Every structure is written in structure tokens, then in C-alpha cells.
Amino acid sequence: MSTTVLTPYSSTAADGRAGFAGLLRAEWTKLRTVRGWLIALLLTMALTPGIAALDHSECSIISPSGNTACSATIGPGGIAVQDDYYLLHQTLNGNGDISARITSLTGAVPGGSNQNMVQPWSKAGLIITDGTSPGAAYAAVMATGGNGVRMQYDYVHDTAGMTGAVSSTSPRWLRLSRSGDTITGYDSTDGVHWTPIESVSLAGLPDSVQVGMFATSPGTTSTSSGSLGGHSSGGSLVAATGTFDHVILQSPAASGNWTASSVGMADGPDAAGGPAGGGPGPAVGAGHEGGVFTVTGTGDIGPDNGGTPVEQTLTGLFAALAALIVVAAMFMAGEYRRGMIRATLAAHPRRGRVLAAKTVVIGTTAFACGLVGVGLALPIGESILRSNGNYFLPVSTQTEVRVIAGVALLTALIAVLALSLAAILRSSAAAITCMITCVVLPYVLAKLILPSGAAEWLLRVTPAAGFAVEQTLPRYTFVSADYSPAAGYYPLSPWQGIAVLTVYTVAALTLASVLLRRRDA
Amino acid sequence: MTSSTSDRSASGIVLRTWTTVLRSWAPILRAEWTKFRTNTGNWWLLGGLIVLVIALGAVSDAVTSCAAGTCDMDPGKTCLIGVYAAQAVAAILGVQAIGAEYHTGMIRTTFTAMPHRTRVLAAKAGVLAVTVACTGLVAAQAAAWLGQLVLPGRGVTPADGLPGLSPLHEPMLRATSGSALYLALIALLSLGVGAAMREPAPAIGVVLGLLFLVPLFATALAPATWQRHLEQISPMIAGLEIQATTNLAALPISPWAGLGVLAAWSACVLALAQILLRQRDSQ
């Protein structure tokens, strides 16, 4: 009797196919072989630049004072600035020192009777400037309506001095001292004990500069609101008046006579409510009586965000995302539709790895599509908007790289979120509806419908927070402007926004992986 | 005497015609209603629609704060804000009403039993429109009642020149009944897109893209002069002006005309779907 040894069957197929690389290849094959999905992925790539190419926005640089022009005043460093104020000045050759006491700062709507319209950033003080043409380099020390004494220079730099408002009972002494390229600002309560605020260096300041007293004020801030209503009151012009005395200009070579100049202020004194207006409000201008100087001006000295920001070219991203969401949801839910999931899971029984492979494939593909889309949309949109006469707000290369990489990452996260939702809901139509309602609708509501408070809240807590990654408009604490979502400002910083979206994505992916393992396929 | 006899015969003809019509339509309508009501998913979606309208309206009422005396918030739009999200639910209902049949192959059975395809589409549209409109009306009335309770405490009061908040009187009645009609028209638009595209997933993407992206692109891409015209033809922006209760002169389009624009969109898409349905083989 002989015994037969039975060897158990073993497949002769190569082992490698069962590994994760094989799984990735299988999922990639599924994705690329469905013609409709391939078309939708191409749309994901093409819609962002395609819609950017359709942009017909007219040139609109709307400065806070309401001016509309197709070019911007360019300040030091090539940034767009607003440089509108009234100045009482002398020429200063070489080094020198100016000090003055400011006894009041009031604000009024030109031609109006209400004298208590002083704005938080109404300003009056001393300035040393390269000249009276807008955009000149300058350093100034000033009293403000609601932010104490400040030293500001070259439009984007701001340092706090003494706190508290200025009045006749608590006047502020201000001083500016020039030594070569260095200008130092001081403040004081008595004109004897001076506290330095900051020493700044204005590189290339010529020997001959203008020195004097200035006043200016931004208008009342208007906040954009959606069609729901809310605070949609338009801003009105405000003229600030500063009253100075004890003006001392120490200089070996000052010209001696005070000259009044309107810098910028496109409206001109008459349009801003001169005496012809007939109202009791102050006229823009300057006066001098017995050692007391008054200067009245409207406008602002600071950066101007009125141009077209880079993210204007990315409107088409929403259409691209809609196409991508459809593919990502069907990539997962399609498995359930025709029972393909049973074959998939029979081939790869470790369900977590199947989900991981799908996530990697759709995430990488979406990232690549997003990268191509935004990489093409920025230059195409920019050249078209420029040819329509729009002024583009300049951004650093670093910011541009952040926008491109950030939007690609946003695209990948949204694809993975859609995939996870489809795995949870096991229906592509439901997953697509949830995705578009949670990602695109909050943005639409925030941008077009809701008042700013509710809009900011939506852009903090919904996955739409991730769109913050495309914002390049800078926010300045020392410029009063409309910082609402309707004006293009997100409540969260770019990476905070991406973090919110990531939390949603990770939570959905975790739930999807738990459910995939627990539920019967 | 003679005239009364002819009257009777005329009304008899009308009655007979109606009976004939009803008799021919009744089975189709009943079949579609049976399909609709036996799908539990539909009842969940209708429930979700009510919850969305009421819950989002309640949040919107609660976070509103308006300076009394200078308030310019629109009370109708504020308490009915949930319709923006609920329209997505109406869109799924519309797309699935025909998409699910293509999905499962049921459509072949349907067309075998009822070869008149236009009638099938019309019956689906009728069942869908009536169900969604009734559900929408319940939800919108409830949201308006909530608004009437909460909004005066948030500074939105009729004393500021704003309209009265009673849901049973103009203009709130127009806002609520109009919102219900809006949801029904969105469901019909989605039914048309679903029938034309046959695949529910891309169809829902197209519907929501049309609703949400057109106003976005109108604002971002078009010169100011076109923007108003684009808003006038955008199904969502024009359609939802029916919710406006104050400052009607500033709207891009008057409330009922806006709803008419959406109705035209739905009618055109359904007509296109009907042509495609008759021409194509039902896979």
C-alpha cells in the first residue's frame, strides 16, 4: 500500500500583484478606463483656465474714497497706494527737525453739519516726504481718531506711540527729526520730555524734501452685504481737521514760507465741499492765524487694495470642482452600482487597503489636475484682465506658489472628501448633492446672499473654509476698509482654512473606512 | 327651454371628455404615485427638505441682529434661507424620479406597460410637482411662523417700514407659497435633466452647477452692465426673488416674473427631455 502525498494547491501567479502597488494599479486602471470620467477629469483641468479666459470684468480699481480709475498710484516697493491728503509744507534741505503741538482732531462730512464724524483712522500730524506727487516716500508721526499716536512710513509700516485721543485738555506734542536717510518720530505730553517712537530709514531720500503738517481721513466704512440686506450703507467722505500750534522748524536752510498743497485728492477742494457747497462743514484746505494752523483733508495715506487680486482668475475653480466631485463620488459609489465591489473585495480582502488605494489614486489625480488647472488659469486670466485695462495687485512669488500649491491641495482634499462621502452613503447622487451643498453653496451664500457676520461664520465652520487658500488680498490693521467675504476677504488665514477642510476630510475618511469594514458589501 | 337643453348637452360633452381623460390618465398617475410612495428614500428626502427649511431658517432668524429703526433686512429672505439648501433635496428627488428607473432597468418595464412616453414623463412630473410643492408649503409656512416669533426680537419689526410678518398675509404669503412653487419647479427642472442625461450622478452635478455657479460667474466675470441681465436669467437668483418682501424696486426682476423665468427653464428642459425620451431607445 502506497501513500500519496497531496500538495495543497498554490497559485502560480506572481505575488507582486497582491501588494499595494498592484492595488494602486488596479484602481488607476478603473479610473482611467471609464470614458465619461476621463472627460470629467479633463474638464477639471480645463474649466479653471477656460473660464478665466472668458473673464470680461472691466477695469475697476475702486479706492476707499470711491474713485474709479484703471491705474493705481504706485508707492515705494511697487505696491499700489492711496496717497490723498492736505499738506502745509516748506522745503527742507539736509538735516532738520520739526515739532508741533496738536490740540484737536475733528471730522465732518464735507458740507454736513455733524462735526463728530472723526474716524478711527482719521489722521493729522507731521510729515517728511519726498515731494507732493502721490506715491512719494515719506515718514510721518500723527494723532489718529481712535488709535492714539502712530508713526507710519512708506504706506505699509505702522508703529504705535502714545494711546488716547487728542483734545485741547490733553494735547499731543509731535516731533520728526531727519538725519541723512534716518527719520525719528517722537511724541510727548508737554513738549519737554520726548519719547522716541521709531527710527526709520528711507533709503535714497534726496537732500531736499518737503516737511510740514498734514491732515486726511478715510470715509465711513461701507460693508458689502448680500441680497438679504443688512448693513449696506455706502461710505461717505469725511474731512479731518487738525489744529496745530507751537510749530517749530529747526533747520539751517528751510525756505521760511508755508505752502498749502493738495496731494492726490482727485476730487479737489470744491468737489469735496468747498465754500461753494454752502454747508457749515469744513472746506478742504489750510489756515493760519496767530501761530495756530488748521489743516483739513480727505483721503488716506496707506496701501490700496482696490485693484484686481490674483484670485479673480480662479472663479472657474468652482466649475472644475463640480466636475471632479462627480468623478470622485462615482469612482467609489460606482463599485456598488453594478456589484463590482464584491469582485474588488474578493480580489483584495483587506478592505482598509482598498479604500487607501482609491484615496491615493483619486487624491493624486485631483492634485495633478488642480495643479495644471490653476497653473494655466493664473497666467491666462492675468493677461486677459490686464488687456482689459485692469490693474493687478502685485504679489510675491512665494504667495503665488502658495496659491498654486494650495489650490491643488484643496482640489485633492475635496476629491477625497467626495470619495469618502460616496463610501459612506453608497450612492453617488446623494454624495454629489451633499458635497456641492456643503462645499460650493456656503461659498455662494457668503459671497452673494448673506450679510457679512453670517457669511464669515459660514466660511469658518463649513468645508468651504478651504477656499481661504486662494486669498492674496492683504489685510492691514491700520486701514479701514470693507474686509467682508463679499469683498474677497476670508475670516480664516489660508492654512487655517485648509486645516478646517482637512479635519472634515480625515473624519469622513475614517468613518468611511470603519463602515466599509463593518458593513456587508 | 331649447337653450337649457343645449347647455346640458354641452356640459355633458365636457364631462364625458373629462371622464375619458381621467380614465386614460388615472392608471399612469396611480402607477407613478405607487412607485413614488413605496420608495422609502423619497419620504426621508421629503422629511429632510422640511427639516432643512425649518432648521436653517431658525438659525438664520437667531443670528440676525438689526439696528431697530434703520433695519433693512428682508424678513422673507431671512426666515426662508433654508430653501437654498432644500433645493438640493428637491433636485435629488427630481433626478432620481427617472434616473433610478434607468439605474435599475425598471424603465424598460415602465415603457412596456405604458408605451406613451410623453404621458409617463408628464405623470412623473405631476406626482413630483404636487408632492414637493405640498411639502415645501408646509416647510415654508412653518419657517415663516418661526420668523414671525423670533425676528421682531432681533430688530426686524414692521415699525421700521418693513412689511408685516404674518405668514397668512401678503407679502409673506407670496414668499412662502412662492418658495413651495420654487422647490417644485426645481424638482421638475431636475426631472428634465435626469431624463435627458439618464445617469443620476452627472445629472445632479449639472443641475446644482446651473443653480449655484451661474450667479457666481455672473458676479465675478461679467461687466457690471451684463450682471443684472445674467441675474435676470439665472434660475436660482431670479427664481428666489419670490422670497423678497421689502425693497422690491431694487430687485433685478420682480418676484413673480422671477419665478416665471425658472418656470421657463423647467419647461424648456422638460420639452428637450421629452424629445430625447421619444427618440432614444430605452437602453
Image (cartoon, helix red, strand yellow):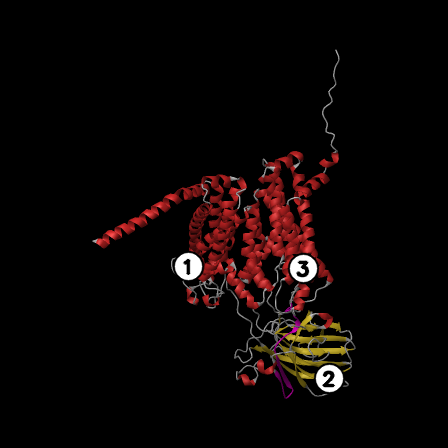
- Point 62% across, 43% down: residue: A332
Which numbered marker is on residue B174?
Answer: 1
* Amino acid type, residue under disc 3 in the picture: Ala
Q: Quadrant of residue B161?
A: bottom left
Q: Is residue B162 above or below residue B144?
A: below
* Residue interval drawn in magenta: A285-307
For label 3, count other residues whose C-alpha is less than 10 Å away and answer few (under 14), some (14-19) or many (20+).
many
Looking at the rendered structure, the secondary structure element under dot 3 is: helix
For label 2, count other residues whose C-alpha is less than 10 Å away and answer few (under 14), some (14-19) or many (20+).
many
* Amino acid type, residue under disc 2 in the picture: Thr
Q: Give the camera-side residue of A467 and A206.
A: A467
Looking at the rendered structure, the secondary structure element under dot 2 is: strand
- Give the CA separation, mark 1 to mark 3: 43 Å
Residue B125 appears in the rendering: yes
The residue that mark 3 highlights is: A377
The residue that mark 2 highlights is: A91
Which label's residue is closer to the chain start, 2 or 3? 2
Looking at the rendered structure, the secondary structure element under dot 1 is: helix
Q: Is residue B71 above or below residue A97?
A: above
- Which subunit holds the residue at mark 2? A
Q: Measured from the top left, where is residue A406 in percent x and y?
A: 68, 55
Looking at the image, is mark 1 or mark 3 nearer the viewer?
A: 3
Residue A305 included in the magenta stretch of the image: yes
Looking at the image, is mark 2 or mark 3 nearer the viewer?
A: 3
Q: Quadrant of the N terminus of chain A?
A: top right
- Give the CA separation, mark 2 to mark 3: 49 Å
